[in-house]
Amino acid sequence: MKINIVKSLVLGLMVTGLTSCDFLDVEPLDSYTESNVFSDIALADAYLTRHYTLPVNGFDETALRFVCDESRNNFSWGSSYTLTRGEMTPDQYGSFGIWDSYYANIRSCNIFFNNIEKLDADENEKNSMIGEMTFIRAFYYMDLVRRYGGVPLITKTFKLDDEEMMIARNTFEECVNFVVSEFDKAAALLPLQQTGSKFGRATKGAALAMKARMLLYAASPLWNTGNDISKWKAAADAAKEVIDLGVYSLDPDYKGLFLNSKSPEIIFQRLYTSEYDNGFDWPNTPNGWTGWSATCVLQEMVDSYEMEDGSMPDVSVYSKATGNPWKGREPRFYASIVCDGQTFRNNVVDFWVNEDGQTGGKDSEYGTDNWNKSDTHYTIRKFMNESLLSPWEDKGSQPWIYCRLAEVYLNYAEALFETGNEELARKYVNMIRERARGGNPNVLPNITATGNQLREAIRHERKIELAFEESRWYDVRRWKIAEKTDNGPENGIKIIKKADGTKSYKIEQIDTRKFIAPNHYLFPIPNNEIRKSSKLEQNPGYDKI
């Protein structure tokens, strides 16, 4: 069987910055076979390494921040408006579904497992490669399960005429058990740390953290309808296992950790180089800097950030303000969101329009690149490398962080609370707040709530700490609150600059979101896949659309 992989192998090696090898003069680039690849350690390793470039991430145009209550996309990339307006169907659901691409990736993993024993290599090195690919395949399945529920578990390759290709979906529980067991298997084979040319590859901690994430999802109300406490305990135990490794620590620099691949907080990440950058900075730069303002942060997200004293902002401040209505917010607000009047890349952001309604600041609808103005008059600061003064030419190398210690602490706190251990749950969520306050004891007081108020405080802390990190979309679904969070208006801010230089502020509606239950708690399986197999059942609600 020919495997047309070399171009993507080379790209994957360049993008990730992982181990490289000199194999381009071995055979014609379109003629690699399984026997070629798995008879050469360099080619086999390149085959494996390529998979680090394949999972979706929040730098992509189909980032989940666009389709939850964090932000909207300026251009409906991936048909994001189709999702947010409740128009998603099995035939038209945009690019946010990952079914086709992930099953192609899983098939590639299965080819690896079918052939790896043929490889003449040191047994320890081979076991490490098996651990990495086991992790990667489990990662694909975890993402599929979180988006679709139970999916077919395929662990071998099929021939085109193989009747076994007609397979049904495994149950959600079967999928969770498989994913958890695979992450356990990977953890047993992987090292605590990857160094040198292998830096950035999966580790024991990454496997255990993903296991903890899967168990937390399985324990949540969407699937744990009877609130089986043993599921919450399993999730808590798994998170504690990561913490007990003693390998990771909270980075004191909340803003900087997202630019630093060597941050002690990172558990698993996708690496980028300045030559083959992540493509995030220029599309998300305000339009006054020839950017596209792609991530338009919603007013609802802006007003989710607490004031310094821990109170929630009074939204009436906008109608009363003549100066800065965002003054006095907690530090993570300023590390995550760009507002009018703030400094960004050594320049002042001007989202305002003049009273004449015909002219305005450089970042407004009347600026130089007015077609790129942010619909909400907010853009994203988190993940942005502000040292890139000309992001069209200068390239960023900040990583995409799939998992970091703060998430594990929050996973642990949530699971502890649900098992009844409120004291320890408060301890771990307050550790997150302690880092956020940046050494200022007068900012962000510790959470002292109990009962349901503590549950809500933990959930709120996740929303802020993990903002735009591909967590919120899953969280509101596993908690079964998306009917509230993803229904209703999408709001922004309108800023009018008066002749005397003062400004007035008014919240204005940009669009309306629609969430249909139970349909939108899960993605639809593409109809072209349903048509291939009579055994493959559609998710609830979509067959009636």
Image (spheres, rainbow, N blue to C red):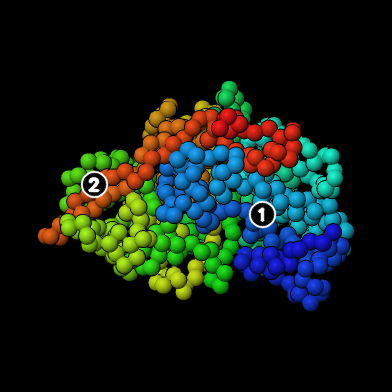
Q: Residue at x 35, y 52 (%)?
A: 375
Q: Is residue 274 above or below residue 193?
A: below
Residue 336 to residue 220: above or below:
below
Residue 304 visible: no
Q: Where is residue 26? Give x, y as percent.
A: 81, 74
User: Label 1, on which residue?
Assistant: 203
Asked whether 197 or 373 is in front, the reply is 373
Q: Secondary structure at mark 2?
A: strand
Q: Amino acid at mark 2?
A: Lys
Three-letter code for the amino acid on which mark 1 is drawn:
Thr
> Between residues 436 and 140, which one lies in front from this camera angle?
140
Write down the residue under mark 2: 506
Which residue is rendered at x = 46% and y = 74% of the image? 393
Residue 228 vs residue 434: left or right?
Answer: right
Res. 378 image quadrant: bottom left
Residue farthest toward the bottom in the current orientation of the protein: 25
- Residue under the point 49% across and 48% down: 80
